[in-house]
Image: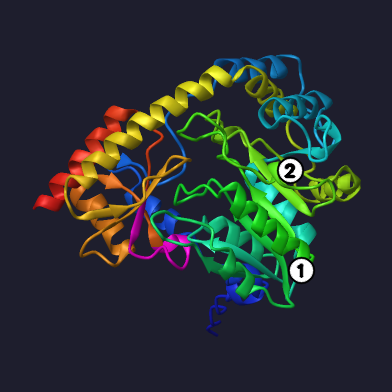
Amino acid sequence: MTIAAPAERNWLAEIHPVPREAAPSGIVEVFDYGRGRQGLIPLWVGEGDLAPPPAAVEALKASLDRGETYYTAQGGIPALREAIAAYMNRVYGEAPGGGPFRPQCFFATIGGMHAIELATRMTLGPGDEALIPSPAWPNFVGAIETSGARAVPVPLGRKGRWSLDVERLVAAVTPATKVIFLNSPANPTGFVATREELAATLDLARRNNLWIIADEIYGRLTYDGVRAPSFHDVMAPDDKILFVHTCSKNWAMTGFRIGWLEAPAALAPVIENLVQFTTSGVPVFTQRAAVAALSEGEPFLAAQIERCQRARDILCEGLLSTGRVRFFEPEAAFYLFFTIDGYPDSRALAFRLIDEAGVGAAPGSAFGPGGEGHLRICFARDPEQVAEATRRIVRWLKR
């Protein structure tokens, strides 16, 4: 008797539809396509080529040598929370309402993405909506929609610069709106919300009893010598704002996966529960590295900003010389978001640049409405390498 082989189970049909239907990252698709290409210059992800500050590496090694490899406090080790508070006092002057920042308001996370996950879990659920100025990093949408909520893109303004269009935010609010998710300085556009734009957004949130999730991780990576405006500059102590920060960008520590969430201290029991239920804590050795970066990393950050500015200027000047590339010069962060005349399909264009120019760029379509037709290049790399990538694109355009 012949026994028929069992039919292969449709595993995708067996899981919950929310994660199943989450859109894949268009950045990862292009990255996977070009990964390993001989001679390709990879400028597609938000990561530079610098090694982390030596002090951070040595602190991590010393922690391991001491045997700090066990579970720890869910909110983070006291030394890190104190170092974050001291750093915030140096950079922002004082906490909202006056006085110093308190360690109890900072919670260690597995990078900025974990902080985003915690913030969305506390503020959003099925049927809720979150407004996101767009184009925006796709992980914001992913975090919102895998929580069962709906991400509502709100176009940025484009009058001489990328800008926050508060009137569009006002028009987008519905009874289901619970959160405004604002990234400034922004990935992918490099725009910086002004103090006035932040104040107007905060006023909107107050009138509608909304939370703000403020991703300000690029606030120090500016090119005019001062940090970017922050909600810290305009808020009151009782405003409903959660802040996302990370060591990944300022101190080139992407692989360390260490960041923090800033929140009212009264939320500590909830946040620490969520940490327990998601990661069971942050490795002590990466927290020790973060302490070193926050305490000793200012020279590293200053050198990185100077390096990025040189790379930015090389890239912008070279692409403008073609007469076919359009963009607003980035005010902060380390991305150029641009269009090339005659190439409206950014996904197809990204693949062509890999195959024909040997340059990896992220397609603008990955960043939501308003992104199509653009490419994003990360210029947080050796200026000579950025110069070579620029020459390759210019030569390709002249063919």
Q: Is residue 369 magenta?
A: yes
Residue 283 position (above or below residue 238) = above
**Closer to us: 261 or 229:** 229
Could you tell me residue 284's position as x and y percent? 75, 27
Three-letter code for the amino acid on which mark 2 is drawn: Leu
The stretch of residues the image draws in magenta is: 365-376
Q: Is residue 294 left or right of residue 54?
A: right
**Closer to us: 12 or 305:** 305
Could you tell me residue 146's position as x and y percent? 66, 65
**Closer to us: 360 or 321:** 321
Three-letter code for the amino acid on which mark 1 is drawn: Asn
**Whether residue 120 is visible:** no
Element type where label 2 sits in the image? strand
**Whether residue 218 is visible:** yes
Please identify the quarter of the rendering in which residue 385 is found: top left
Mark sitting earlier along the chain (1/2): 1
Residue positioned 33% across, 33% down in the render: 311
Q: Is residue 235 left or right of residue 102?
A: left
Crowd rating for badge 2 (residues with CA inside 10 Å; few <14, some 14–19, many 20+): many
Residue positioned 32% across, 49% down in the render: 34
Q: Which residue is mark 1?
A: 208
Quadrant containing the N terminus in the rendered view: bottom right
Q: Which residue is mark 2?
A: 261
Crowd rating for badge 1 (residues with CA inside 10 Å; few <14, some 14–19, many 20+): some
Residue 370 position (above or below residue 104) = below
Kindly give the residue lying farthest to the front in the view shown. 196
Please identify the quarter of the rendering in which residue 358 is found: top left
Q: How is the image coloured?
A: rainbow
